[in-house]
Each structure stands twice: as structure tokens, then as C-alpha cells.
Image (spheres, rainbow, N blue to C red):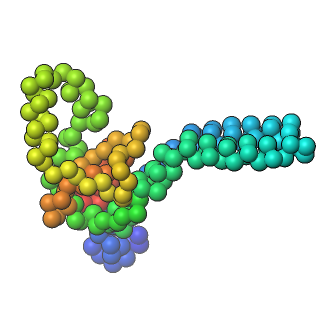
């Protein structure tokens, strides 16, 4: 049979893990709303001020462009540093690409059991001062994970998972859909 997977004539030659494709879509509503609102405001000001006060309108245009950049810095950062694609057995996060086979199977299982950021914050609120001091002492002794793809930290509105590569280096991946990413990585790793 043509197009079937598995051994035999006409089967695909690539292993199952290479057939997994995953791409995380970035939210676009905030960017579209802010740009539309600012463009409408600039157009309204242009209708009022042009052609007599063109200098004032150009100042307003520049201010609106700067404001659009400030309001959309986080979505732009997400697009550059934290866009996730999984294709052909390679995980691309922002500007960095890793082989899925380089991630350890044990760390992927542990990442599935890690609490979400909201669950972790709730568990911290229930701790005593002594427990928090002990956690702080242990965490300062541990090696912090490197953020895959670059950037300074996990952007607002994103969750995170921590996995290890074959060399034992902890890697932090910022994601919008934690469960879907872990499922795709697990399927690609053929666990």
C-alpha cells in the first residue's frame, strides 16, 4: 500500500519522530487592536490638522509609532525569541534549533509532572517562612536553566517547561500551550 507507515514496500522511510509537526501560533489580537486604534487616532488627527498644521501631525504620527512599539514590545519579543516550531525531529525556539533526540526522555516525563506557574505560585502562598527560606537556599545552590531561543526571561502570558539535554544542561522553554508542546515533544522523541 502506498503512503503507509511501517516496514514494507511503499512505506515512508522516515522514522515516526520525524513525522511529528507542531507550530505554536502567537496571539495577534493585542497587536491588531493597538495598531488599529492608533492608526484610527492618527487618521482622525490628520483630518483635523492637515494641511495647515502638518508639523503637529508629523509629531503625532511619530508619537503614535513610538507608542505602538512600546505597547507591542512583548508580542514582538515573543515572535523573535519564543516562537516554537517542531519539524523533522528538530525543535526551533526563536533563533535556536535543537535536535529532539538531544532532550532526555526522563526530563520530558518530569516536565509533564511540573506544576504550572499558577499552581506553583499557589503552593508558595501556602508555605511558611522557614519553608520558603529553605527553598530559597536550595534554589540559589542549583544551576539556573538557560532560556532556549534567547531573551531575558519568560514573557508575560507564557508558561514554561524545564527539560535537560543529553549533556545534563537544564533548558527552559517558554510556551503558550504547555500540554500540546509536551505531547508533540514526547511523540517526536518516541517515548
Residue plotted at (90% across, 45% down):
51
Query: Residue 126: x, y in percent?
Result: 18, 21
Relative image position of residue 55 (x, y in whole percent): 81, 47
Residue lying at 42% horizontally and 38% vertically, measured from the top left: 157
Where is residue 14? Give x, y as percent.
32, 72
In the rendered image of this protein, does residue 35 appear above or below residue 100?
above
Left or right of 78 on screen, residue 90: left
Residue placed most toward the observer, 115 or 143? 143
Say left or right for 144 vs 184: left
Q: Quadrant of the C terminus?
A: bottom left
The image quarter containing residue 35 is top right
Report the residue at 42% width, 56% height from top: 81
Q: Quadrant of residue 85?
A: bottom left
Q: Is residue 32 visible?
A: no
Could you tell me residue 187's position as x and y percent? 28, 56
- Classify the position of the N terminus by image quarter: bottom left
In the foreground, 150 or 187:
150
Say which residue appears at 22% left-offset and 46% top-offset: 111
Give the mark count.
Answer: 0
The relative height of residue 121 versus residue 15 in the rendered view (above or below) is above
Residue furthest right in the image: 52
Visible in this render: residue 156?
A: yes
Q: Along the line of sight, which residue is nearer the eye, 176 or 80?
A: 80
Amino acid at each position: 500500500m502506498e503512503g503507509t507507515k511501517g516496514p514494507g514496500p511503499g512505506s515512508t522511510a522516515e522514522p515516526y519522530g520525524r513525522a511529528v509537526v507542531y507550530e505554536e501560533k502567537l496571539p495577534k489580537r493585542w497587536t491588531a487592536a493597538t495598531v488599529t486604534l492608533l492608526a484610527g487616532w492618527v487618521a482622525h488627527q490628520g483630518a483635523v490638522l492637515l494641511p495647515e498644521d502638518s508639523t503637529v501631525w508629523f509629531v503625532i504620527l511619530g508619537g503614535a509609532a513610538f507608542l505602538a512599539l512600546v505597547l507591542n514590545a512583548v508580542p514582538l519579543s515573543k515572535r523573535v525569541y519564543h516562537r516554537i516550531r517542531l519539524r523533522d525531529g528538530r525543535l526551533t525556539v526563536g533563533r535556536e534549533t535543537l535536535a529532539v533526540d538531544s532532550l532526555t526522555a526522563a526530563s520530558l516525563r518530569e516536565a509533564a509532572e511540573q506544576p504550572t506557574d499558577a499552581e506553583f505560585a499557589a503552593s508558595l502562598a501556602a508555605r511558611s517562612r522557614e519553608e520558603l527560606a529553605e527553598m530559597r537556599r536550595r534554589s540559589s545552590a542549583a544551576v539556573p536553566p538557560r532560556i532556549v531561543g534567547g531573551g531575558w526571561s519568560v514573557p508575560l502570558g507564557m508558561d514554561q517547561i524545564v527539560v535537560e539535554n543529553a549533556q545534563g544542561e537544564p533548558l527552559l522553554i517558554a510556551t503558550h500551550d504547555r500540554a500540546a508542546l509536551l505531547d508533540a515533544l514526547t511523540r517526536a522523541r518516541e517515548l
